[in-house]
Image (cartoon, helix red, strand yellow):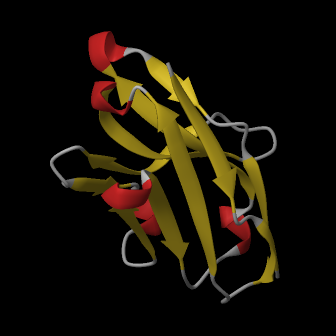
Amino acid sequence: QVQLVESGGGLVQAGGSLRLSCAASGRMFSISAMGWHRQAPGKQRELVARISSGGSTNYADSVKGRFTISRDNAKNTIYLQMNSLKSEDTGVYYCWSLLTYNVERWGQGTQVTVSS
């Protein structure tokens, strides 16, 4: 199995920055991609950014140019650098991993609140 632990959420003013971290442990060889999803109050969970085992990245249109996903293989950790935050970025951010056989694993979530 794979376990994911997020950190780095909090309260920030609009225009500010935050960096989220997600540390993975367990059967690392089974991970084909990792990323971040978020869920705003009353809305469905949506993909924010993902990074494949080969290093390719994808972003939601709403965060392109503002968010950057990266990883540190030595630490089994991915990061989400969030700049120019907007109130609509508020939500619970979940670390996500895609394993072999399309099995998904999720972290417990971390709250990001952007005040306008």
* Nearer to me, 44 or 2: 2
Asked if residue 60 lies left or right of residue 32, the reply is right
* Nearer to me, 87 or 25: 25
* Nearer to me, 6 or 61: 6
Residue occupying the far left of the picture: 54
Residue 16 position within the rendered picture, expressed as x and y whole percent measured from the top left: 67, 88
Residue at the spot x=65%, y=44% of the render? 5
Residue at the spot x=46%, y=55% of the render? 77
Whether 17 is drawn above or below 42: the answer is below
Whether 13 is drawn above or below 18: the answer is below
Residue occupying the far bottom of the picture: 15
Asked if residue 79 lies left or right of residue 74, the reply is right
Residue at the spot x=51%, y=74% of the render? 81
Asked if residue 34 lies left or right of residue 86, the reply is left
Q: How many marks?
A: 0
Whether 70 is drawn above or below 4: the answer is below
Residue 79 position within the rendered picture, expressed as x and y whole percent measured from the top left: 48, 63
Whether 19 is drawn above or below 6: the answer is below
Residue 48 position within the rendered picture, expressed as x and y whole percent measured from the top left: 48, 52
Residue at the spot x=66%, y=89% of the render? 15
**Which quadrant of the structure image shows residue 111?**
bottom right
Q: Quadrant of the C terminus?
A: bottom right
* Nearer to me, 14 or 55: 55
